[in-house]
C-alpha cells in the first residue's frame, strides 16, 4: 500500500475515533446535563418548576427514563404532577422520513392534582403556552408529518380533583390506561381506561377513534359510584341536606365528530339505594332502584327509543300548605336580578329531526306515597301503599297513552286507576277510578272542613268514570257507602257548604245499612270557572238539602211511588176509622220505614173544622133520622152496615128534611135548623172524640205491622191551627231521623 493512502486511512481513523469519542462523551454526559438544564430553566420556560431524581437518555436506542419526575404548582411548593417512573422511546431513523414514531410511553404511579377556581384551573397558564398564529399559518403549506404513538401504558395512577367554588372533591385511584396506539392519520386508535373512585365504585372504558374520518366508538362501564359525590352540584339548585345512592351504567356510544348530533347511544343506567333529605333532614324521596334500558337514542335522526323504565320501591310524600309545598321549597330561587336578553333570531339551520320519544314499558313497583294537606283546620295525612303501575308504548307526542295503576289505601281498601289520553292537554281524556272498601273515618278532616261534620266510621266504594271530549266532561260517580256514621255538627265552624249531611245520610241508609248515590258531573274543563271538586260538593249538597227538606220524596222515589202516596193519608172526618183504601197508603208508609231502621214516623191529623162541624152536624141529623127508622139500633153501637146506610142518605132526602124541620124550633135553612138541634160545641166535642178514636185505631194498626211504638207519633194539630186550617182532611206524614242535632 502506498504511503499516502496509509496516511489518509490513518487520518480518517483518527477523525472517526474522535467523533466516536465525542458521541460517547455526549451519550455519557447528556443525561446529567439535560437534567440540570431542565431543572434550572423550567421555571423560565413554562412558569413551573420541574424536578427529578434521575434522568437517563440513550441516544442509540432513542429512549428516555425519568425517576421521581415532578412538576410544581406556580407556588413552587405543591405538586401539580408527579410520576414515579416515566419511560419514553422514539425511533430516530423514522424522523428522516418525516414520521414521529414513539415506540412506547410508560407512566408508573402518576399523581395529578387538578383544582378549579370558578372558570379557571390550576393548569390554565400552561394552556397559553405554544407557538404564535403566524407560525401556524406558515406551517399550512408544508407537508404534514405522520405521527404515531404506540404502547401507551399508565398504571397505579391517582387523580385528585377539587372544585373550590363548590367545595367538591373527587379522588380517582388505581387509574389504569392502556392504548395500543394513537394514530393521527390512516389508522384507528384503540384505548382503554379504567380507574376506581376513592369513595367506592369504578369506571372502565374502551374506545376506538379514527382521526382522519372522525369516527369514534366508545363503551363505558360504571359501577357503584356514590351519588353523594355530586352533592355540591345538586346543592346549587336544590335545598337538600343529603343525597345518597349508587350509580351504575353500561353505555355504548358510536358517532362522528364531523356531525356531533348524529350519535347512536345504546345501553342501560341504574340508580340503587337512592335517598334524598331536605334541609330539615326530612325524607323527600327514596327508591330501591331505577333502571333505564335504552334501545337507541340519536338526536340527529330524532330517535329516542327506550326499552323500559323500571322504578322499584319508590317512597315519597307531598306536604301541601296554603302558600307552598315541600317540593316547591326544594327549588332554590335566585336573589340576583338578571337582565333579560332580547331573543336573537336563530340563523343556524338544524338538519336534526324533531325528537320522537317512545318508551316501550314504564313500570312502578312496590312503592308508597303519603299526602298531607295542611291547608285544612284539621291536617289530613293519608298514605297509599303497595303502589304498582304499568304503562306500555308511552310517548309524549302520542294521541293516546295508557296507564294501569293499583294501590292499597290507608286503613284497608284498595284503588284501581285506568287512564287513556294524550299529554298535549286535557282535550280528550278517559279516566276510570275504582275504590273498594275505603275507610271513611280517614277523611274526617275534609268532612269537617266542608260540612262541619266529623266522620266516625264507614266504608266507601266508588266507581267513577270521567270522559272528556273536546274539553267537555261527562262523568259518573257511583258511591256505595256501608255503615256510615256522622257525628254532630260543629256549629262554630263556618263552612262553604251548609248542608244537612247527617240527616241526609240517615235518610239514604237502607235496612242493610247501605247508601247508594249517583253523582253526575258535567262541564267544560277548559273554562276558568270549572272545578271538579266544587261540582261534586254542590251536587252532594243539593241532594242532602233535598233529602232533609223532603225525605218522603226521596223514599217514595226509591220505592217507585208518587210523593203524595207517602206524604199524606186523606180520610173522611165524619168517619171514625180509615177505609181499606186509606189503610193501603198506611201499608206503603210502613214499607218505606222498613228500608231504614233509623227513621221515625209522625202522623198529624189535619181537619178543616168549619167543614167538619157542618158535616158532623148533618151526619148527626142523618144518624138520628136513621135510628128513628130503625128502633132496634137505638142505644146500640152502630155497625159498619149502619154507617154505610147512613152515608147513603142524601142531604136532599125529603124524609130527612121533614124530620129535621119537626125537631127544630126555628125557621130557616136545613143546616140552620140542624145546627139549632145539634150546636157547634156539640159537634166539636164529637169530632174531638172521633179524632182521638181514629188515632188509636191507626196507632194500633201501624204498631201491629212492625213499626216500634217508640218510633211512632200519632197526634192532632193544635187547637189554634185547627181553627185556621182550611185544607183537606188528612194525616200529614213526616218521616225523619230522631235524635239528630239541629242542622
Image: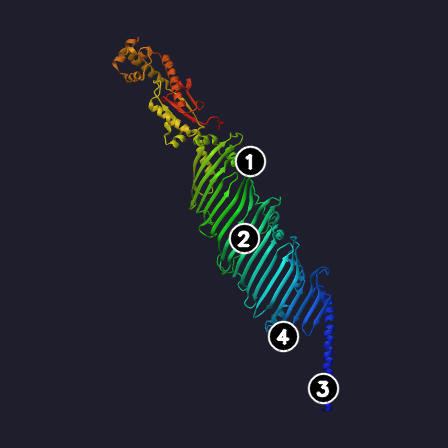
> Which x, y percent locates residue 281?
62, 44
Q: Which residue matches tag 3? A: 9
**Front position among marks 3 and 2:** 2
Count of numbered badges drawn on the protein: 4
Q: Which residue matches tag 1? A: 378
Identity of the residue drawn at 49% across and 38% down: 438
**Front position among marks 1 and 2:** 2
**Front position among marks 3 and 1:** 3
Q: Earlier in the sequence, mark 2 or mark 4?
A: 4
Q: Earlier in the sequence, mark 3 or mark 2?
A: 3
- Per the rendering, the mark at residue 291 is 2
Q: CA distance from mark 3 to mark 4?
A: 32 Å
Q: Earlier in the sequence, mark 3 or mark 1?
A: 3
Identity of the residue drawn at 58% across and 58% down: 221
**Front position among marks 2 and 4:** 2
Could you classify mark 4 by the number of other residues whose Cα lies within 10 Å: few (under 14), some (14-19), or many (20 or more)? few
Tag 4, which secondary structure?
Answer: helix
- Residue extending farthest to the bottom is 2
Q: CA distance from mark 3 to mark 2?
A: 82 Å
Instruction: Say if residue 635 shows up in the picture.
Output: yes
Q: Earlier in the sequence, mark 3 or mark 4?
A: 3
Image position of 318 (left or right of 628): right
Image position of 539 (left or right of 161): left
Is residue 34 placed above or below 423 in the rendered structure? below
Q: Which residue matches tag 4? A: 94
Q: Earlier in the sequence, mark 4 or mark 1?
A: 4
Q: CA distance from mark 4 to mark 1?
A: 86 Å
> Which x, y percent locates residue 293?
52, 55
Tag 2, which secondary structure?
Answer: strand
Tag 3, which secondary structure?
Answer: helix
Q: CA distance from mark 1 to mark 2?
A: 39 Å
Amino acid at each position: 500500500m502506498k504511503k499516502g493512502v496509509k496516511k489518509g486511512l490513518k487520518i480518517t481513523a483518527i477523525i472517526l475515533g474522535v467523533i466516536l469519542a465525542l458521541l460517547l462523551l455526549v451519550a455519557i454526559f447528556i443525561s446529567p446535563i439535560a437534567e440540570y438544564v431542565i431543572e434550572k430553566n423550567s421555571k423560565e420556560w413554562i412558569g413551573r418548576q420541574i424536578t427529578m431524581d434521575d434522568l437517563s437518555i440513550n441516544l442509540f436506542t432513542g429512549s428516555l427514563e425519568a425517576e421521581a419526575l415532578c412538576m410544581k404548582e406556580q407556588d413552587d411548593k405543591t405538586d401539580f404532577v408527579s410520576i414515579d417512573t416515566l419511560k419514553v422511546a422514539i425511533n430516530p431513523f423514522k424522523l428522516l422520513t418525516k414520521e414521529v414514531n414513539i415506540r412506547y410511553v410508560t407512566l408508573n404511579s402518576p399523581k395529578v392534582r387538578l383544582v378549579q377556581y370558578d372558570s379557571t384551573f390550576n393548569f390554565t397558564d400552561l394552556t397559553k403556552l405554544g407557538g404564535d398564529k403566524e407560525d401556524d399559518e406558515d406551517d399550512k403549506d408544508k407537508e404534514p408529518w405522520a405521527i404515531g404513538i404506540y404502547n401507551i401504558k399508565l398504571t397505579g395512577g391517582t387523580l385528585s380533583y377539587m372544585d373550590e367554588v363548590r367545595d367538591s372533591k373527587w379522588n380517582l385511584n388505581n387509574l389504569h390506561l392502556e392504548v395500543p396506539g394513537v394514530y393521527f392519520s390512516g389508522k384507528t386508535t384503540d384505548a382503554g381506561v379504567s380507574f376506581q373512585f376513592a369513595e367506592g365504585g369504578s369506571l372502565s372504558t374502551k374506545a376506538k377513534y379514527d382521526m382522519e374520518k372522525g369516527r369514534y366508538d366508545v363503551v363505558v362501564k360504571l359501577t357503584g359510584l356514590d351519588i353523594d359525590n355530586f352533592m355540591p352540584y345538586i346543592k346549587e339548585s336544590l335545598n337538600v341536606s343529603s343525597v345518597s345512592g349508587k350509580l351504575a351504567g353500561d353505555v355504548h356510544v358510536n358517532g362522528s365528530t364531523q356531525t356531533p348530533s348524529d350519535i347512536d347511544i345504546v345501553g342501560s343506567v341504574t340508580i340503587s339505594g337512592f335517598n334524598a333529605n331536605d334541609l330539615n333532614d326530612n325524607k323527600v324521596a327514596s327508591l330501591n332502584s331505577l333502571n333505564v334500558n335504552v334501545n337507541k337514542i340519536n338526536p340527529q335522526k330524532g330517535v329516542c327509543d327506550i326499552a323500559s323504565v323500571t322504578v322499584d320501591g319508590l317512597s315519597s310524600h307531598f306536604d301541601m300548605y296554603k302558600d307552598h309545598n315541600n317540593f316547591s321549597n326544594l327549588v332554590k330561587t335566585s336573589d340576583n336580578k338578571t337582565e333579560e336578553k332580547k331573543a336573537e333570531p336563530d340563523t343556524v339551520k338544524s338538519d336534526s329531526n324533531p325528537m320522537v320519544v317512545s318508551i316501550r314499558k314504564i313500570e312502578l313497583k312496590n312503592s308508597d306515597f303519603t299526602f298531607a294537606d295542611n291547608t285544612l283546620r284539621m291536617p289530613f295525612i293519608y298514605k297509599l301503599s303497595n303502589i304498582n303501575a304499568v304503562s306500555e308504548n308511552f310517548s309524549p307526542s302520542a294521541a293516546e297513552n295508557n296507564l294501569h295503576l293499583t294501590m292499597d289505601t290507608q286503613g284497608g281498601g284498595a284503588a284501581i286507576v285506568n287512564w287513556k289520553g294524550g299529554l298535549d292537554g286535557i282535550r280528550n281524556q278517559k279516566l276510570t277510578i275504582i275504590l273498594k272498601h275505603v275507610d271513611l273515618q280517614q277523611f274526617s278532616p275534609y268532612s269537617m272542613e266542608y260540612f262541619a261534620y266529623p266522620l266516625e266510621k264507614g266504608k266507601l266504594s266508588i266507581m267513577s268514570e270521567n270522559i272528556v271530549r273536546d274539553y267537555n266532561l261527562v262523568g259518573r260517580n257511583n258511591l256505595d257507602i256501608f255503615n256510615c256514621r256522622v257525628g254532630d255538627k260543629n256549629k262554630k265552624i263556618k263552612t262553604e257548604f251548609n248542608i244537612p249531611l247527617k240527616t241526609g245520610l240517615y235518610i239514604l241508609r237502607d235496612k242493610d245499612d247501605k247508601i247508594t248515590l249517583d253523582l253526575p258531573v258535567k262541564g267544560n274543563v277548559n273554562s276558568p270557572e270549572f272545578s271538579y271538586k266544587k261540582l261534586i260538593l254542590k251536587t252532594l249538597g243539593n241532594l242532602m238539602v233535598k233529602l232533609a227538606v223532603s225525605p218522603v220524596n226521596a223514599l217514595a222515589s226509591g220505592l217507585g211511588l208518587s210523593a203524595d202516596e207517602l206524604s199524606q193519608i186523606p180520610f173522611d172526618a165524619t168517619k171514625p176509622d180509615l177505609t181499606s183504601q186509606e189503610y193501603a197508603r198506611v201499608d206503603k208508609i210502613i214499607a218505606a220505614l222498613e228500608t231504614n231502621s233509623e227513621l221515625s214516623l209522625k202522623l198529624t191529623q189535619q181537619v178543616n173544622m168549619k167543614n167538619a162541624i157542618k158535616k158532623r152536624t148533618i151526619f148527626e141529623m142523618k144518624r138520628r133520622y136513621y135510628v128513628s127508622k130503625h128502633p132496634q139500633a137505638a142505644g146500640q153501637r152502630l155497625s159498619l152496615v149502619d154507617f154505610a146506610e147512613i152515608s147513603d142518605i142524601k142531604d136532599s132526602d125529603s124524609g130527612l128534611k121533614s124530620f129535621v124541620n119537626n125537631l127544630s124550633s126555628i125557621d130557616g135553612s136545613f143546616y140552620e135548623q140542624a145546627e139549632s138541634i145539634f150546636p157547634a160545641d156539640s159537634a166539636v166535642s164529637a169530632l174531638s172524640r172521633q179524632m182521638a178514636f181514629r188515632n188509636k185505631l191507626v196507632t194500633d194498626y201501624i204498631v201491629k205491622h212492625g213499626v216500634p211504638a217508640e218510633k211512632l207519633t200519632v197526634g192532632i194539630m193544635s187547637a189554634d191551627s185547627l181553627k185556621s186550617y182550611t185544607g183537606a182532611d188528612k194525616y200529614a206524614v213526616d218521616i225523619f231521623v230522631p235524635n239528630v242535632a239541629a242542622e
